[in-house]
Amino acid sequence: MTLKTALVTGAGRPAGLGFAVATRLAEAGFHVVVTGRDLAAVEPLAEGLRQDGYAATALCVDLSDRASMDVAAAHLTRAFGHLDVLINNASGMPDFATLSALEADMDVVRSAMEVSVIGPWGLTQTLLPLLTAAPAARIVNVSSLSAQQIATGLDLGAPLRSPAYSMAKYMLNALTTVLARALADTPILVNAVDPGNTATHPERGDDASDRPAAESAMDVVGAATLGADGPTGALFSEGRWQLPAPQAG
């Protein structure tokens, strides 16, 4: 049987969603490739999974550095020859205190777009030969409820809370649909998942009412293991799939 492989970006924090997703995928029988900008942060996490009896590798993937993506792709090609699952999880909320698009710092906007839109787009391009080499690969982009402020007018108590982060996640949802349409003639499914408010920073002490990361991770893993009849170009949020509008013509 061909080894199932999965790469997760932004998986360098033990309490983070990325590592929770990697752990769940490892438990499901995947060889997980745990990645982050700092190899020194992800290697101990991969080693911990190996000590627990799971298959795991650590790699450096910096979404602002195309060269690091190329190095990761070369490693995966040598080691596996294919990639079954790509989880674009890496993110950051650099402007949490900003409450209006009119107050947004453009440098922060550029940074958010690099991590949440340009980076996943470029990584998908780089890994596409490996994804197409798998029998039926899955790409999952981790979105956020914040994007719904723009998509649906959701009121989060401000004109636009975290405008750089929210706009980047909105654009990530759009990218999901675009990639799904570009890959419509392949077995690859591309979807976005909004994991909801997730407790990933226990040191802050302000997320006690949020979902545990291990629970939120199951939504992401669900999208990563969809069958051939699953949706593509869709968003999973609040327990249901929001399907894309049909193409004209």
Image (cartoon, rainbow, N blue to C red):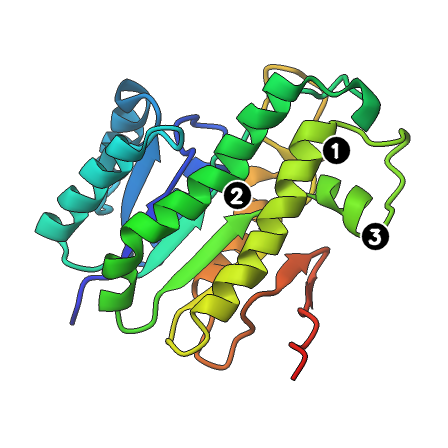
Furthest toward the left, the residue is 78
Q: Name the residue at 40% across, 63% down.
A: 138
With respect to residue 211, does 100 lie above or below? above
Quadrant that contains the C terminus: bottom right
Please rate how many residues cluster around mark 1, counting C-alpha atoms within 10 Å: few if below 14, some from 14 to 19, many from 20.
Answer: few
Q: Position of residue 114 (x, y in %)?
A: 50, 32
Q: What residue did someone put label 3 on? A: 152
Q: Which residue is mark 1?
A: 209
- Residue drawn at (26%, 32%) of the image: 68
Q: Disc 3 residue type? A: Thr
Above or below, comparing residue 100 to residue 213 in the picture: above
Q: Give the residue type that dot 1 points to.
A: Ser
Mark with earlier residue (3, 1): 3
| 36 shown above or below 218 | above
Left or right placement of residue 79 versus residue 168 in this view: left
Mark 3: give few (<14), some (14-19) or many (20+) Cα within 10 Å: few
Tag nearer the camera, 3 or 2? 3
* Residue 128 point in image, percent of width and height: 30, 58
Q: Secondary structure at mark 3?
A: loop
Question: What is the distance, in whole Å, between disc 3 and disc 1 at their CAs?
Answer: 25 Å
Q: Residue 116, can we see it?
A: yes
- Residue 94 visible somewhere in the drawing: no
Q: Are marks 3 and 2 in contact (CB under 8 Å)?
A: no
Residue placed most toward the observer, 100 or 145: 100
Q: Secondary structure at mark 1?
A: loop
Q: How far separated are the C-alphas under marks 1 and 2?
A: 14 Å
Label of residue 214 in the image: 2
Identity of the residue drawn at 24% across and 60% down? 129
